[in-house]
Structure formats: structure tokens, C-alpha cells
Amino acid sequence: MTKLPAATTINKTKLSITLGDITRQETDAIVNAANPGLMGGGGVDGAIHRAGGSAILQECQQIVSRQGHLPTGKAVITTGGNLKTKYVIHTVGPVWHGGNKGEARLLASAYYESLRLAVDRNLKSISFPSISTGAYGYPVDPAAEVALKTTALFLKEAPATLNEIVFVLFDTKTYNAYSRAIKDLHYQLAKEDYDETDC
Ligand code: ADP
């Protein structure tokens, strides 16, 4: 079997994928694939609220009463409640409507805005789930490509304050899709480096 790279480094930040439960991560922040009402729900959202306790939900309610529902592609931050992480970044990915309703741009925005918040808070590490590929129905292969390419682009542009970004994937089908996408990214970055040193 071919051994695929499960990690790559961009601008001093380690980008990796792992199979597991994001609620157990000890990174400075974990990202929640939330819904616009920030009220908790199923999937990763439900798991984070169950494990994190009522403090997270209370903070979410305060955010919604201040600024209303969270638009798709935007992100907000709360503390981590009972979780090992210090912060939870809540973002809303797009519902899949076939691919012609701006889904890729909105998914990229969900990752980008979450990373922006982490860097603004000077956090060193962050974990992401596979946003939108559960109840929201985004096909996992193109979603993995958007997730990893957006992260790579962010890291190339941003000051290198993050040490580590981890994609925590809950099942092997999702893990394998991200594994293919990180391999593609790895080779693409290596080629760009080669092209740069070549000229
Ligand atoms: P969305 O509504 O954005 O599609 P879901 O929570 O339904 O969000 O699914 C997003 C991804 O999160 C799916 O791949 C799902 O299997 C995964 N997931 C569910 N629970 C967890 C968990 N505890 N840790 C990491 N990923 C999870």
C-alpha cells in the first residue's frame, strides 16, 4: 500500500490530519461546525456542547442576542467550557445545494474566518472537523480540497504565529479523502518551492 503523507509544513506551521474525536483535542482552539442559531444540534456540534457543558451554550446565546444569527462563512469565539481546549471557534459552513450556489467560496470563508480569529487571538494551535460534510451534505472529496487549500493559502499570506493546525476526522472515509487532499497539497507545495528556486 502506498504511504501517504499525513502532514506537511507551510511557513513554519505544521498541518496534519488525524482520525479521532475533536472534543478530546488539546489544541488552543477547536472549531465547531455550528448552525446559524448557535444552539447546538447533532454531529460535531452536539458532541462539543455535550462535552463542553452549559457555559459554551450560554456564551453562544449571548452572541446571538447581541448580533443575531451567524451568517454562513462567518465565525465567532467562546471559551472551551469543560473541554481541554481553551476556546471553541464556531463557524457555519454551507449546506450543499449541488455546487452552484457559492458553496466552495462559503466553505473557504468558514475556514479562513476561523483561522483569522485564531491568529487575532494569538493562538498557537487549532483543530478543525470536516465542516459541512455531515448533515450539510457537502461531498467529502471537494470539501477536503477546499479545506486544505484554503488553509495553505492562509498560511502563505499570514504571519506565522500558528504552530499547528490539525484536521480531526471522525471516520475512515473522511480521513481517506483528506489524506488524498494533503498528499496533493504536499506535492503542489514541493513543486512551487522547486519552481521558485529554479528561476
Ligand atoms: P455539518 O452540519 O457542517 O455537515 P456535521 O457535524 O453533521 O456538520 O458533520 C461534519 C463532520 O464532523 C462529519 O464528518 C462528522 O462525521 C464529523 N463529526 C461528528 N462528530 C465528530 C467529533 N466528535 N469529532 C470530529 N468530527 C466529528
Image (spheres, rainbow, N blue to C red):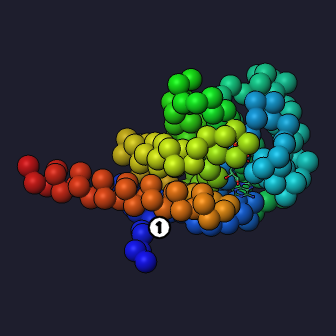
Describe residue 190's horizontal placement relative to residue 65 as left or right: left
Residue located 51% across and 49% down the image: 141
Q: Position of residue 153 (x, y in %)?
A: 40, 43
Q: Looking at the image, is 67 positioned above or below residue 103?
A: above
| Numbered circles on residues, count | 1
Q: Is mark 1 within 8 Å of ligand 1?
A: no
Question: The residue tagged with tag 1: helix, strand or loop?
Answer: loop
Q: Position of residue 82 (x, y in %)?
A: 84, 58
Front residue of 97 and 87: 97
Q: Position of residue 131 (x, y in %)?
A: 63, 45
Q: Position of residue 197 (x, y in %)?
A: 14, 55
Residue located 42% across and 68% down the image: 5
Describe residue 100's horizontal placement relative to residue 32 as left or right: left
Residue located 60% across and 57% down the image: 174
Residue located 85% across and 31% down the image: 62
Quadrant of res 133: top right
Residue furthest to the bottom: 1
Q: Looking at the image, is 175 positioned above or below residue 158?
A: below
Residue furthest to the right: 54
Describe residue 25's horizontal placement relative to residue 153 as left or right: right
Front residue of 183 and 21: 183
Quadrant of res 96: top right
Quadrant of res 76: top right
Q: Quadrant of the N terminus?
A: bottom left
Where does label 1 land, which residue? 6
Neighbours of disc 1 within 10 Å: few (<14), some (14-19), many (20+): some
For residue 145, say whether it is visible. Answer: yes
The three-letter code of the residue at mark 1 reads: Ala
Q: Looking at the image, is 81 positioned above or below residue 153?
A: below
For residue 119, say whether it is visible. Answer: no
